[in-house]
Image (cartoon, helix red, strand yellow):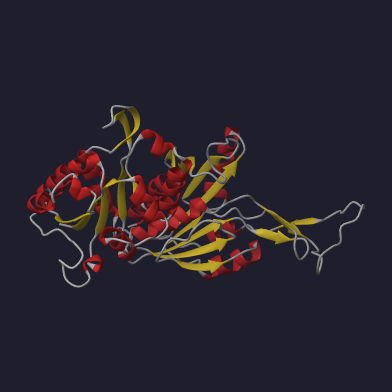
Amino acid sequence: MARIVLGITGGIAAYKACEVIRLLVGAGHEVIPVPTRGAERFVAAETFAALARSPVAHAGTAGLYPHLQRADLLVIAPLTAHTMARLAHGLADDILTETALAHDGPILAAPAMNTRMWNHPATQANVALLRERGVEIVGPASGELAEGEVGMGRMAEPAEIASRIEDLLRAAGSLDGLDVVVTAGGTREPIDSIRFVGNRSSGRMGLALAAEARRRGARVTLLAANVTAAVPPGVTVIETPTAADLEREALQRSGADVILMAAAVGDYRAAAPVDGKRAKDDDVWQIALTPTPDIARQLGMRRTAAQVLVAFGAEHGAAGLERKRGMLVGKNVDLVVYNDVGRDDIGFDVPDNEVTLVTADGDTLVPRAPKAAIAVAVLDEVERLLEGRR
């Protein structure tokens, strides 16, 4: 049995929260309803309390600090565009947003709003920001809306929300006691004091992996190479801007239970970087590049039988998949996550990805999905490999 805080915001879909509560209580969970004032315009607080068999949390009614209560999971269903914006920007101006800001466990949100509101760039930016912070999003679905329009914006059905809740609760704690190292971002190799050569990467995929590993209970260390997105809470961060920095810190942690090498490590660096800034002139600047160390191969040489090593391989075009299969043996890793960066809709600087998981048992395609969902698929495969070690 889990303790679940259910936030309910002020949309017409608030009536569906009643069925969510019924399903969760029927499954044996303790549910603490936290409706906003807007939600109570649609459904009375007494209804939520009766279905949950638990008092509704209001400011001043559940002790001095009702927003600080411990829970295994925070669910917000429905989540309106307004409350989504407040959560994305860290506002805490009512009991629900205070609870969300104080909650240090997994969060599941089920958006519900008009299609035009859902498609607005501000809403999409807020969704992306919440996902980067590890918030799980379920729905919305397409269909008939309350105002008579048809389109994307319907809250996911209560049964789907309850199913996702059970999935999250099963995964929570599955990596308890394990040390996980994640590399993220792209290294930058200086050619003078202000210029560099490097690989494109925002670090979003690595950050999603770190957030998911932390959600599953692991002790997570993130080796961050110039990441541009928000770092998930509860993760130890070590800045590793260059390949040499990343090599040093990764090798120091080569004994971790799981190492996820998602960083785009520069393959070359300047053989003789300029000390200071080279002044611009009309001459051709010829720069000799030398290969950087292969960090994945070094970790593979040091590995123990109980470890799981995961390498990431970006290629331009599907022909690179065969090269990624060769990495399993060539670098002595258990899993290679292959993605085609030749497409504009996945990979670099976008919220979605599509990958192929390459193991000794074969290849598994993970269709295009938010990077948080890709991280779930990768960690599920890691757990399968860990179970095989045991």
**Where 325 falls versus 60 (above or below)?**
above
**Can residue 196 be seen in the rendering of this structure?**
yes
Q: Residue at x 14, y 58 (%)?
A: 56
Looking at the rendered image, the quarter that the C terminus falls into is: bottom left
Residue 341 in the image, given as x and y percentages of width and height: 58, 40
Residue 334 vs residue 156, the one in the foreground: 156
Identify the image quadrant of residue 116.
Answer: top left
Identify the image quadrant of residue 365.
Answer: top left
Q: Residue at x 19, y 41 (%)?
A: 16
Residue 234 in the image, given as x and y percentages of width and height: 40, 66
Identify the image quadrant of residue 177.
Answer: bottom left
In the rendered structure, the answer to whether residue 27 lies left or right of residue 312 reads left
Judged from this view, the residue extending furthest toward the bottom is 64
In the rendered structure, the answer to whether residue 367 lies left or right of residue 319 reads left
**Can residue 365 be seen in the rendering of this structure?**
no
Residue 270 vs residue 13, the one in the foreground: 13
Q: Residue at x 83, y 55 (%)?
A: 287
Residue 181 vs residue 195, the one in the foreground: 195
In the rendered structure, the answer to whether residue 289 lies left or right of residue 11 reads right
In the rendered structure, the answer to whether residue 88 lies left or right of residue 191 reads left
Residue 2 in the image, given as x and y percentages of width and height: 18, 57
Q: How many marks?
A: 0
Looking at the rendered image, the quarter that the N terminus falls into is: bottom left
**Where 369 falls versus 376 (above or below)?**
above
Residue 305 in the image, given as x and y percentages of width and height: 43, 60
